[in-house]
Image (cartoon, helix red, strand yellow):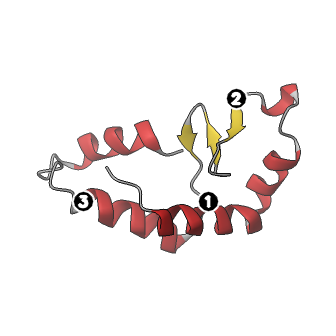
Amino acid sequence: MTIFSDFLSLVKEKQLVHVRLKGVKELLGTDEVKEFTLGSDSVLRFRGRMCIPEDAEVKRLVLEERHKSHLSLHPGMTKMYQDLKETFW
C-alpha cells in the first residue's frame, strides 16, 4: 500500500484536532504512552502503526485506497482487516 503525502498531511491535520490523540501527543516521552511515537513525518504512531483519528473522511480514504489497490485482489473482509491492522491503528 502506498501512502501519499496528501494523505499524511490530512492525517496530521486530523490528529491535531482529535481530542484523544492530542492528549497522547502531549504525554509523549512518559511511561503513560510509551508505546506511542512521533514519526519523522510528524504522524503519531502506536507500536509503529499510524494512528488514524475517528474521522469519517480519513477512514473512507484508507478503505478506498486499500480496496482499489492492485495487490489487494479483493481478499475478503477479514483478510483486508488484517492487512490494514498491520499499518494503521
- Distance of mark 3 from mark 1, alpha carbons? 19 Å
Q: Amino acid at mark 3?
A: His
Q: Secondary structure at mark 1?
A: loop
Answer with mark 1 or mark 2, whichever residue precedes in sequence.
2
Identify the residue at image location x=34%, y=38%. Answer: 82
The quadrant where residue 61 appears: bottom left
Task: Give the residue furthest to the bottom.
Answer: 57
Q: Position of residue 15 (x, y in %)?
A: 69, 61
Q: Are marks 1 and 2 in contact (CB under 8 Å)?
A: no
Task: Identify the mark at residue 35; answer none if there is no mark.
Answer: 2
Kind of residue at disc 2: Glu
Residue at the spot of label 1: 53
Measured as percent of width and height from the top left, residue 48 is found at 56, 34
The answer to which of marks 2 and 3 sits earlier in the sequence is 2
Q: Which residue is mark 3?
A: 67
Q: Nearer the viewer, residue 4 or 23?
A: 4
